[in-house]
Image (cartoon, helix red, strand yellow):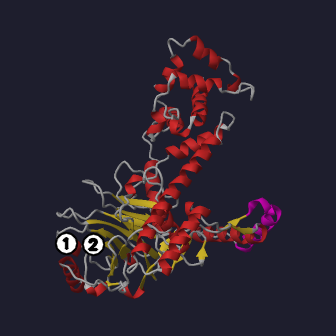
Amino acid sequence: MRTSKASKWVDLLIRNPYILHSQFTSDGFGLEEIWNSIPSVKLDKILELASKHQVSIIALQETKLNTRHRLRVKGYNIVRQDRSSNGGGGLMFLIRDVYFQRIDRINSPRKSLESQGITVLSRKHNNNINIFNLYHPPNNQKLDLDALEGLFTNATVLIGDLNAKHTAWGCALENNRGQDLENLSNDKAFLFLNNGTHTYRSHSYNTTDALDLTISSPDLFPYCSWKVVDYVGSDHYPILIELDYDIKTYGNNNIYWNFKKANWTLFEKNLNEQLQKNPITENLENEWFVFKHSIFTAAEGAVPRGKHKKTRPAFTNDSQDLQKLLAKREHLLQSHNLNDNTDARIELNKINAEIKREYCSIKQSNWQDLCKSLDYKTPNTRLWRLAKKLDKIQPQVENTNSIIGINGTSTVNDKETADALGNYYSEESKLALGRENKKTGRATRKLIRSCRVPASNELFNIPITSSELLYAIQQLDFKKSPGPDANEHVKETFYENEKKQPLIKMINEDHLGWKPLIMREMGLEIAQLSFFNKIVCIH
């Protein structure tokens, strides 16, 4: 989805929301091999396309993820649905700048049909949009028409790959699945956005087809546009869908108040003048409005405004080596007819494999450079920031990014949000503590807030050995400061009590949360200072 330039403080009004639809499969290459350790070059390219076209919703099929894969996509809400039985399949939404609520999973007795849905929230409840992400593998099973029929409702867009073929959307041949889908769409008066352009190309088998479908309800069809966009290395081309529709967004406001350059004397003078113009009345709501208006009016003349610079996100494929390979691939696609040129298809597969290797090499090189920049002189604050960043896990299935009201529905405007928050905190503030227990209650809450959360990354929980701890202590700079670094008792504790090993036992059996960071693949530079931080906490 794309935001318009017009904005007012917090809320942005989207006139042209976009949906980017793509698949991750590719001949001879499974993404599950690199998802967990190295982000996919295809995902990086899709995120670059999303940034270029100001996309707010990305729908992906065949992610091939499972529960052991932890995905991080900065700036996006993740809504995943992994296949639980075997490999392959999997669906995912990546969402930003719009309020949404996940739709409960559709139950289908036929396990082949995979589906997930979200509701994009509008400023009015009756203007919400339902988006369903679908995938059906190319097997002999028929479509579950009973399950699909429940998705054909008003204000709905269906996107995905059902491996259904029909001439109505650009396929050369028809199959039973395509005929069933065409009949169901006609019965429900739904319309296909596909314009006949092929969305799938098999370079190994030299075939093309229109497998990726977009079906819209009749009330949304006049506001939709559809086109195939740049090749990203997959055998399925990304599709860009535009909805010319009003959607409530929460895009970042680019304008800010520069309080460092404020003229507070002038502000006080302007505010007093504004308040004196309006006599006080007994109308509380009117007085509150006048008070707010007076503050903003006074600030406009005394506090300067500024704009944040919009920076383009950095992507791995911005490197010169990758850019050369991408340009070479683009030239090959434009200058050769791959349908009639076997050598060109073979060359394209070679370039794609080389891009994958180069991408992995760049990511590994960046990580090695980071490790080399860390030693025992690195500030503790930097190390802890890195450790917390590594330990932080992004939610993989978010139900909503909006406030849920008392009735269980998401709020769509400021008044509903304020009412829901007010009701929630009014209940939370009703403490069942007597006067004599208030002191105990305050002490308990303070203790709870000070507790550290256990590390979620298993790499932080690997026990350290005596040799690793000894190495870390030997590398400490005891002349750096008169603080804990200069405490010779750290060495004495280890050397004099080596048989009992109280220090190593306290570290490895610590229940406060942060375990020492033992990541031998990253090098001992990170580990040694993480050990020292733990030693300081104990002493």
Q: Is residue 11 visible to the viewer in this orientation of the structure?
A: yes
Q: How many marks?
A: 2
319 and 537: which one is in front? Answer: 319
**Residue 268 lies within the magenta run:** yes
The quarter of the picture where residue 339 lies is: bottom left
Residue indicated by mark 1: 143
**Residue 396 lies within the magenta run:** no
Q: Residue at x 72, y 68 (%)?
A: 306
SS under mark 2: loop
Residue numbers of the magenta segment: 258-278
Residue 497's mark?
Answer: none
Instruction: Please state, as top left, top right, bottom left or bottom right, where the C terminus lies in the image.
Output: top right
In the image, taking residue 93 as reference, residue 443 lies left or right, namely right
Residue 265, given in percent of the width and then of the height, sits at 82, 62
Residue indicated by mark 2: 162
Q: Amino acid at mark 2?
A: Leu
Q: Amino acid at mark 1?
A: Leu
Circle 1 Cα neighbour tier, 10 Å, few/some/many (<14 / 14–19 / ≥20): many
Q: Residue at x 53, y 69 (%)?
A: 326
Q: CA distance from mark 2 to mark 1?
A: 8 Å
Above-or-below relation of 471 to 28 = above
Q: Is residue 411 visible to the viewer in this orientation of the structure?
A: no
Residue 315, given in percent of the width and then of the height, sits at 57, 62
**Are the residues tagged 2 and 1 within 8 Å (C-beta)?**
yes
384 and 251: which one is in front? Answer: 384
